Image: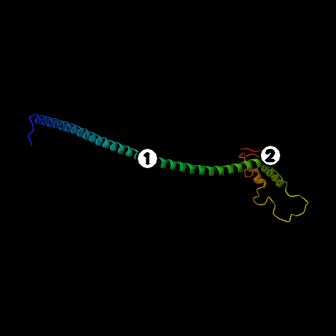
């Protein structure tokens, strides 16, 4: 084989120098790309850590808020239960009071009749037994002992009346006083 000519050697050297420059240029670009990728990776890692920390904070805040709201809900449910029990008790008391009110209304409505009946019973007691009808089969009279209709007890008519007035029997005005 023959040795290459000086022109071929120069061309080959120029070609090698161009390839060498191209390799050096590509290595610089590769290094720049690697630096960019490394910086981006580090940036992503930092951002990931920041996001994890923020997510952790949000999760802790959410858990605290859930705990607080759960406690508040439990207290509210207890309060509601207490109020419901109070309402039941008050409803029961209201039922009792309504019944008693009805009884008092009935008593007040019946009072004139009771006062009239007591007046007539006292008057009958004052009249005594009918003379000439013979002897009663029972020896005891209505005025023996402590009869509620005895004239002595009628003078203190508080036993018979709902009113608190202390008047003589003749002065009684029949009606309802509440």
For the point 62% across and 50% down, the residue is 91
Of residues 32 and 162, which is closer to you in this image? 32
Bin the neighbour count of mark 2 within 10 Å (Cα to Cα): few under 14, some 14-19, many 20 and up.
few
Tag 1 secondary structure = helix
Q: Quadrant of the N terminus?
A: top left
Of residues 141 and 27, which is closer to you in this image? 27
For the point 48% across and 47% down, the residue is 73
Earlier along the polypeptide chain: callout 2 or callout 1?
A: 1
- Mark sitting on residue 66: 1
Q: Are marks 2 and 1 in contact (CB under 8 Å)?
A: no
Instruction: Tell me the quarter of the picture where residue 18 sits.
Output: top left
Q: Position of residue 154 (x, y in %)?
A: 77, 52
Q: Kindly report which numbered mark, 2 or 1, lies closer to the viewer in this rendering.
A: 1
Of residues 175 and 108, which is closer to you in this image? 108
Q: Quadrant of the C terminus?
A: top right
Q: Position of residue 117 (x, y in %)?
A: 80, 51
Please give left or right for residue 52 compared with residue 154 in the image: left
Tag 2 secondary structure = helix
Q: Which residue is mark 2?
A: 170
Q: CA distance from mark 2 to mark 1?
A: 80 Å
Please give left or right for residue 72 compared with residue 170 in the image: left
Q: Position of residue 19 (x, y in %)?
A: 17, 37
């Amino acid at each position: 084989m023959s040795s290459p000519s000086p022109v071929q050697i120069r061309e080959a050297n120029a070609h090698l120098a161009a390839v060498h420059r191209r390799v050096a240029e590509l290595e610089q670009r590769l290094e720049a790309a690697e630096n960019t990728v490394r910086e981006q990776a580090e940036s992503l890692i930092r951002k990931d850590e920041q996001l994890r920390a923020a997510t952790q904070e949000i999760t802790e805040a959410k858990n605290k808020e859930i705990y607080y709201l759960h406690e508040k809900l439990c207290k509210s449910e207890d309060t509601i239960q207490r109020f419901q029990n109070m309402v039941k008790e008050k409803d029961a008391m209201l039922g009792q009071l309504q019944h008693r009110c009805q009884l008092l209304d009935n008593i007040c409505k019946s009072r004139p009749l009771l006062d009239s009946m007591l007046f007539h019973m006292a008057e009958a007691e004052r009249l005594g037994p009918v003379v000439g009808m013979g002897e009663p089969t029972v020896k005891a009279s209505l005025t023996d002992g402590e009869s509620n209709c005895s004239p002595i007890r009628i003078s203190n008519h508080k036993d018979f009346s709902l009113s608190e007035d202390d008047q003589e029997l003749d002065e009684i005005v029949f009606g309802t006083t509440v």
